[in-house]
Amino acid sequence: MRRALVVRGGWDGHQPVAATELFLPFLRAQGFEVAVHETNEVYADAEVMSATDLVVQSVTMSSIGHDELWGLRGAVEAGTGLVGWHGGIADSYRNSSDYLQLVGGQFATHPGKEPSLRVGDETDNYLPYTVEITDLGREHPITAGLDDFELESEQYWVLHDDLVDVLATTTHPTQPYHPWHRPLTSPAVWTRHWGKGRVVVATPGHTPEVLQHPSVRAIVERGMLWAARA
């Protein structure tokens, strides 16, 4: 039986408990023994990490200690898969450039609505946008058979490097109330090989409702199976 470690916490706005609970039945149905931790301290436990085949992380912001960081990095390098969505993986541990290097991309912002339409809550950053499957994505096991799809949620603008394999993108348009001068295409779903391990990041997933969109859920679930140590 393979072992999955679910690590959740950080900023409550991304509902890390409710979000991760969506996927626990799937993992168990796929034959994983699942352990859930509410802090990242488990990453420093070498015995646990060496026996873990998949880490599912939902920890927005927060911080990570030296031993925890290098425990996670070492496990992935040795073959443990790492999967997450939205801020739970792409906006984790802002204090650590070494974590950023591991995942390959970092949330920068989510552009908001036209100022006169903002009401002062999280919906100010909800925009209709398209997730477009790339040519690579149309052939990859995580996204093969999926069509481009529409969401109305936070549209992540991500800073990334060239070692990510981009399976889907989203394009931020120019608007008169934003300071950039041409559209910017940002990765929305990517994979990364790190040592013997595999990393999967999906930027949609601001709420459990977004995670239940059929295409988003398929990407996360397929990503777990693809990333997990065989």
Image: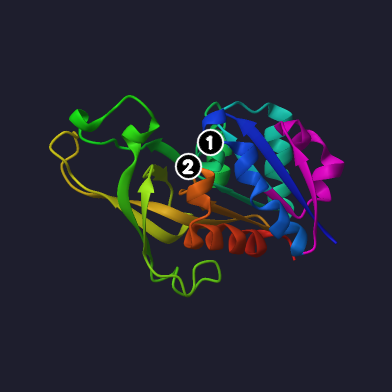
Q: Nearer the viewer, residue 218 or 95?
A: 218
Q: Amino acid at mark 2?
A: His
Please state the horizontal and vertical placement of residue 230, each as a whole percent of the image.
75, 66
* Picture quadrant of residue 169: bottom left
Within 10 Å of disc 1 (Cα), the crowding (few <14, some 14-19, many 20+) is: many
113 in magenta: no
Q: Amino acid at mark 1?
A: His
Please state the horizontal and vertical placement of residue 1, each as a whole percent of the image.
85, 62
Mark seen at residue 206: 2
The range drawn in magenta is 31-55
Residue at x 72% of width, y 56% of height = 25
Mark seen at residue 166: none
Q: Is residue 130 left or right of residue 204?
A: left
Within 10 Å of disc 2 (Cα), the crowding (few <14, some 14-19, many 20+) is: many
Q: Is residue 162 left or right of residue 92?
A: left
Which color scheme does this rendered protein use?
Answer: rainbow
Q: Nearer the viewer, residue 112 or 203?
A: 112
The residue furthest left is: 176
- Whole-angstrom CA distance, mark 2 to mark 1, is 6 Å
Above or below, comparing residue 31 to residue 18 in the picture = below
* Picture quadrant of residue 166: bottom left
